[in-house]
Amino acid sequence: MLLNRIRTVTELRSELDAHRTNGSTIGFVPTMGFLHEGHGSLLRRAREESDVVVLSIFVNPLQFNDETDYEVYPNDDALDDRIAAKYGVDIVFNPSVAEMYPDGTPKTSVRVSDVTEVLEGKYRPGHFDGVTLVVNKLLHMVEPTRAYFGEKDYQQLAVVRQMVADLSMRSEIVGCPIVRDEDGLALSSRNSLLSADQRRRALSLSNALQVGQHQFLAGVTDPEMLVSAVREVLESESDVKVDYVAAVDCDTLRPPNVLSVPFQLLVAATVDNVRLIDNCRVEG
Ligand code: AMP
C-alpha cells in the first residue's frame, strides 16, 4: 500500500476538508514516530472507529527540556511506514519543524495549570507547555472527530483532556491502555536506546508497580508507606535513579491521605541516561 505522506498544513487541510464534506469521521493519532505496537493499539482503535485515520509524526522540540534527549530521539521512516500500513492509516502528516513553527518559537502559549504542576511537571520544566502547544496546533490542523492518546503518558492524557475541556475544543479525547512487552516492560520508543543490560534493569519499573499493587492488596493504605515500598524496588537495582514514585487520585493526580480504590500509581526513573515512565491503575 502506498502511504499518503503529507508535509504541509495547506495540503493536509485540503485533503481533510474533502473528507469532511463527504461526512467522514476523522480519527487522529499524534506521535513522535519510531512506532511500536503501543502506537499500533491507538491506530487500531482509530481504524475501528473512524472513516479516515490520520497519524502525525512530529518530534516536537518545544516539549524537550533536555537538548540531548531531543538530539538522540530515535527515528526510522521505514519502520513507521510498515506500522502505518499495517494499521491501515490513510494519511501520515509528517511536517518539518519550520512547517509547524514558521516564525520560530510561537509567541502564544497554552498553559494548563494544576494538573501540570506535579510529577512530570516538576521534573521536566516547560515540558507540558510544549505538549499543550503542539497538541493544540495539531488538533486545529486536523480537526478530528476523535483523537487517541495512550495511558502510558497518563499525566499527558489528563492535561490534554483538561485543555480540550477548558477551550471547548470539539474533538473527543480517547484514552487507550498501556501495551507492554511479554516481560512487562511498557513499550516506548526510548526502549531502543537501552542496551540488553539496561533493558533488564528497566524492568524494575513495571516490577515496582506490581509490588505497589500487592502492597495495597495486602492492606497498606498509607500512601507514604506504599510509595516507599515501590521506591525500594527501584532503588535496589543498580544505577536506576528515581525521579518520583506517586500514589495519587486518578483525576487530580494529588495524593490522598488514605489510599482507596481506584488510584493511580506512577513512576519515573532514569536507567543510566535513559528516562522512562510507567504507571498502573490499582482497582482492588
Ligand atoms: P510518543 O510517540 O511517545 O509521543 O507517543 C504517542 C502516543 O502513543 C501517546 O499518546 C502515547 O501515550 C502513546 N503510547 C506510547 N507508548 C505506548 C504504550 N506502550 N501503550 C499505549 N500507548 C502508548
Image: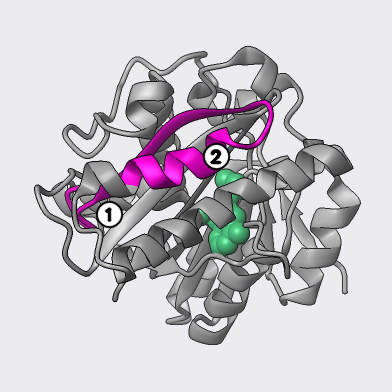
257 relative position to 147: left or right: left
Q: Is the residue 260 above or below the residue 206 in the image? A: below
Helix or strand or loop: what does disc 2 sit on? helix
Q: How many marks?
A: 2
Front disc: 2 or 1: 2
Res. 280 visible in picture: yes
Residue closer to the observer: 100 or 179: 179
Q: Is the residue 232 above or below the residue 38 in the image? A: above
Residue closer to the observer: 145 or 87: 87
Q: Give the x, y percent position of residue 16.
A: 53, 63
Q: Give the x, y percent position of residue 107.
A: 34, 15
Q: Which residues are magenta?
A: 227-252
- Name the residue located 57 percent from the left edge and 48 percent from the top edge: 205
Residue type for callout 2: Leu
Residue denoted by label 2: 234
Q: Is the residue 145 above or below the residue 110 in the image? A: below
Residue closer to the observer: 91 or 255: 255
Residue 177 within the magenta-colored segment of the rendering: no
Residue type for callout 1: Arg
Sequence order check: which comes first, mark 2 or mark 1? 1
Ligand 1: image quarter: bottom right
Residue denoted by label 1: 161
Q: Give the x, y percent position of residue 74.
A: 78, 36
Identity of the residue furthest to the front in this view: 218
Mark linked to residue 54: none
